[in-house]
Amino acid sequence: AQSVTQPDIHITVSEGASLELRCNYSYGATPYLFWYVQSPGQGLQLLLKYFSGDTLVQGIKGFEAEFKRSQSSFNLRKPSVHWSDAAEYFCAVGAIGKLIFGQGTTLQVKP
Amino acid sequence: DADVTQTPRNRITKTGKRIMLECSQTKGHDRMYWYRQDPGLGLRLIYYSFDVKDINKGEISDGYSVSRQAQAKFSLSLESAIPNQTALYFCATSDWTRREQFFGPGTRLTVL
């Protein structure tokens, strides 16, 4: 069955530090992969997506993610975190017109 | 103006009451979805619709029903609300060519 796992429920980083949020998926075919961000009290906004091609994808707000088929992973990265990045982040895999979401990772940013 | 709107944004109701959450979109997408979000569980799919005549159950459809009144409108009903349906509910839309989904702002529902 298709599934998405985000191993880290909560992460705290200092402002200006680098960030990596982990995502592992289980899917039988070539996956469509997404990262969404949910700021407090807001809906979900798409950060980036992978369908095919270059395994390193760039998104909005300075985020990038790398698809690694051998590891079934799609980790999200940012070189330097800003206080405004504090939010909840969701990884998702597209499956037959639907999205399957991970449990989410809450990012806290220390001044 | 927002492309995907949800009404109401907040609702408090009592156990046993019937409640309807509404979703409208101006994106012209055929596909619409209802999710619920619970802390630590991410978003789980309740129902989805690929066009006006197509309704499908998602992962957690028990206790819910939906109506697709038009391409732009997709409503979620709780026939007899119970406290464990307290959650944040999201509507989303997509078109099959892009696959990504666009989310509304959410409805926070509390069942007492």
Image (cartoon, rainbow, N blue to C red):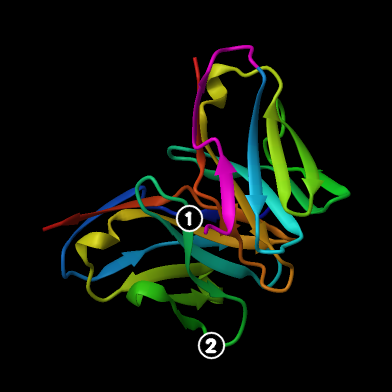
- Residue lying farthest bottom? A54
First to last magenta residue range: B1-17
Q: In which quarter of the image is residue B93?
A: bottom right
Instruction: Give the number of the disc on residue A44.
Output: 1
- Closest to the observer, B4 or A101: B4
Q: Quadrant of residue A98?
A: bottom right
**In the rendered view, would you say A57 is above or below A73?**
below
Instruction: Give the number of the disc on residue B3.
Output: none
**In the rendered view, would you say B8 is above or below B56?**
above
Quadrant in which the C terminus of chain A is drawn: bottom left
Q: Nearer the viewer, mark 2 or mark 1?
A: 1
Residue A43 location (% of width, % of height): 47, 51
Can the viewer see residue B27? yes
As measured in the structure, the alpha-carbon distance from the residue carrying label 2 to the one carrying label 1 is: 25 Å
Dots 2, 1 in contact, CB < 8 A: no
Q: Name the residue under label 2.
A: A54
Left or right for A52, reference A76: right
